[in-house]
Amino acid sequence: MMMLTCHGGTTSPDRQFCSGPLAAHVGGFTAQLSRTGYAANTVHTKCDFLAALSRWLERRQIPLANLNEARLRQFQEARRLQNSIRRGDLATGQQFLTYLRDRGDIAPAAQRLDRARSNRLILEFEAFLYTERGLSLSTVVRYQLVIRRFLDERFGCKVPHPGQLRPQDLHDFILREIQRVSRNQGKTVVTALRSFLRFLLQRGAIQTDLASTLPGVACWRLSHLPRSLLPDQVERLLACCNRSTPAGKRDYAILLLLARLGLRGGEVLAMTLDDLDWERGEFVVRGKGQRLERLPMPSEVGAALASYLCDVRPACATRRVFIRMKAPHQGLAASVAICCIVRRALGRAGLAPEFKGAHLFRHSLATNLLRRGATLGEIGQLLRHRQPTTTQIYAKVDIAALRNIALPWPGGAS
């Protein structure tokens, strides 16, 4: 009679059959790995590890319900003594525990219940930001990261009790954060905390308006010049993309969207396959405040997108345009992933500007258009600014126009 291996195929002399307490669960786990883009050889390797783990549990008469991190460490120690540890085994074991816990087949980890309560609070805050504040995906993600970091620092692995929060907790966290981030990011930290505290007050989780006790971060409007690249530097950066590799084709399409259209990093991140209208040569931008706007798709950008989508984008369930090239195949996690692509591209091109984020291209596009004679109104329309004052910062780079309105220096030459 033909038997099935743990990864769903038929038995063969070079594959190990899975028996023991994990036998009924490994098939579903490996099927999930395959669906999320893991290569067949990787799935086989992970399956072999789980087969060995299952036999070890069976020999020691340890039931599935008793499988946890401590048992994994014991198993790994036994394999170390036999010199049979392979790279990635520990990650496979943790993946499998997560799979079993998500299905309810084993108990949560010791710290998982407290973490689950923390996650539930953050998920409720997320719903508040979407439904009552109407914020965009990228803004919600940024706020969540701040609040998760704050809760972890304040409560650690314990259940978060908002009623225990004091102004000093908030002030200490803000002071630590502004020492490691930029001024604009510091403003985001304070804004995220204020939104979270108002959410807690509205829900009755705290009785005092702690949001009013938070200090502001000094960041005066129009106080600095926009950081930008020269046109030839932008072209050099784009030329340094290795489009012979899958990741290079993806990154080139992302960089073109930033450089030619001035998209924000979050807007590139949120782009879905349904946003691309190939017949009309347009696409939808999911901008700030959940605004949807249609932009023309330049032929250069369209060609790069088509090359990426047709040639290298892995088949997967997500509708997001830009996804991870390595398993698990899913959308890029956050806007920081776009910034990392920009930093790597700058490094390849030998460029080291002070600012290395995705917004560098947006500033560069506006600055270079202004130098070529575009008006501030035209630039604001391209960048989709809702208020003309947002575009005013670019007036500071038009040195020729500023000379015409500059007053003579007192006591200087006429």
Image (tube, rainbow, N blue to C red):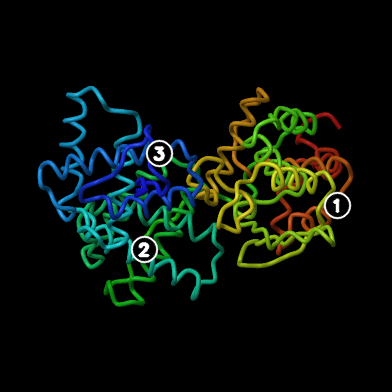
Residue matched to label 2: 122
Q: Where is residue 281 in the image (x, y as percent from the top left)?
A: 83, 57
The Cα atoms of the two marked residues, 1 and 2, are separated by 44 Å
Residue 293 seen anywhere in this rendered image of the structure? yes
Q: Residue 375 carries which label?
A: 1
Identify which residue, 45 or 92, lies in the foreground: 45
Q: In this view, does 133 lie to the left or right of 302?
A: left
Task: Name above or below for residue 240 compared with residue 165.
Answer: above
Task: Name above or below for residue 107 compared with residue 302.
Answer: below
Identify which residue, 24 or 36, lies in the foreground: 24
Q: Is residue 304 left or right of residue 27?
A: right
Q: Position of residue 290 (x, y in %)?
A: 61, 67
Q: Residue 44 carries which label?
A: 3
The Cα atoms of the two marked residues, 1 and 3, are separated by 60 Å
Q: Where is residue 271 in the image (x, y as percent from the top left)?
A: 64, 56
Q: Residues within 10 Å of mark 2 (few under 14, many from 20)?
A: some
Q: Are dots 1 and 2 in contact, CB under 8 Å? A: no
Write down the quadrant of residue 228 in the picture: top right
Identify which residue, 200 or 22, lies in the foreground: 22
Going by the numbered disc 1, the residue's amino acid type is Thr
Residue under the point 17% across and 24% down: 81
